[in-house]
Amino acid sequence: MYSNRVSHLVVSSGCELEGFNQKNYEKLIGKWTEGSYSLINNRRQNDKMTSFKCRCNIVRDCGELYFNGVSPVGDSHGLDCKNPQCGVAQFTFIDKWHSTNLGIDHGFVAKITLPESEYDDVDGWTVSIRFPIHRSNFHGRFELFQNADIWNVLMKEGVVDAVEFVVQQTESNTTDTFDVGSFVIVGRQMPSIPTPEIFFWSHREKHWNCYNPDVRRSSNLFSQAVAKSQHVKEPAFVRNIKLKPNGNIFVQT
């Protein structure tokens, strides 16, 4: 029997799996969409699944997909939180690699393309790159370039288990001179490379509570890392991010 013996999951395209710690679908411990997942390093989930539900051919709008059916905290704070759009920003892997020179090391180079008709340079844009990996299993080094600014790194746990890189159109004195409306992200030293989900807003969303629910307070680690850095004065100057297995974040220009 599978009860309390599940350490790995594979969820097919168009499906969603819910795992529960108790019989009769009680005490939700996680939700997973398309992808392959290892639970070994997650004490809350590994060998803890007693019952599960699986649904396929699910049709959900982008807001429901992003917030998983739970309203953002900003709605109760009087903020005008907008739902993101799906299928607007296109994520394309340019290259991938796997190395065992220094242990297991997965890396990638990817391009995110945004149609210029979907935003203007005054309000800008926001893109959330969501890797469906629990924060306890996620680590690596990441690099962005001058035509896009990292706004935050969100550790989500509970309703959504994922790590999100929130990227916004730069407000610095940088002019994109080629392939306007695109930016590149590089990832190294990752435990695996699942295809991320991409969410798009046609403005720079700067309200923390519009990215809730289930944004852990540990997401403040990004702001703390910027404050502690001797060389980075504000998030817009961050070009290199290191996420350690213990959840600590380090930033560099």
Image (spheres, rainbow, N blue to C red):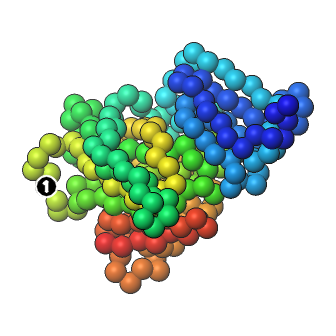
> In terms of secondary structure, where does tag 1 sit?
loop
Would you place residue 228 above or below residue 139 in this image? Answer: below
Q: Is residue 221 in view?
A: no
**What is the x, y in percent for residue 229?**
42, 80
Residue 203: quarter of image: top left
Foreground of the two, 149 or 1: 1
Q: Give coordinates of residue 235: x percent, y percent.
A: 38, 66
In the figure, 144 relative to 133: above or below?
below
Residues packed near mark 1 inside 10 Å, few (<14), some (14 to 19) or many (20 plus): few
Residue found 48% across the figure and 42% down from its top: 194
Residue 41, image x, y percentages:
68, 55
The spot of residue 34 in percent (x, y) is 55, 31
Question: Measuring 63% from the left and 61% from the top, which residue is drawn there?
Answer: 217
| Residue, far front | 101
Q: Is residue 40 left or right of residue 246?
A: right
Number of callouts: 1
Q: Which residue is mark 1?
A: 175
**Amino acid type shown at disc 1:** Thr
Residue furthest to the top in view is 57
> Which of the two residues, 63 or 102, is positioned nearer the viewer here?
102
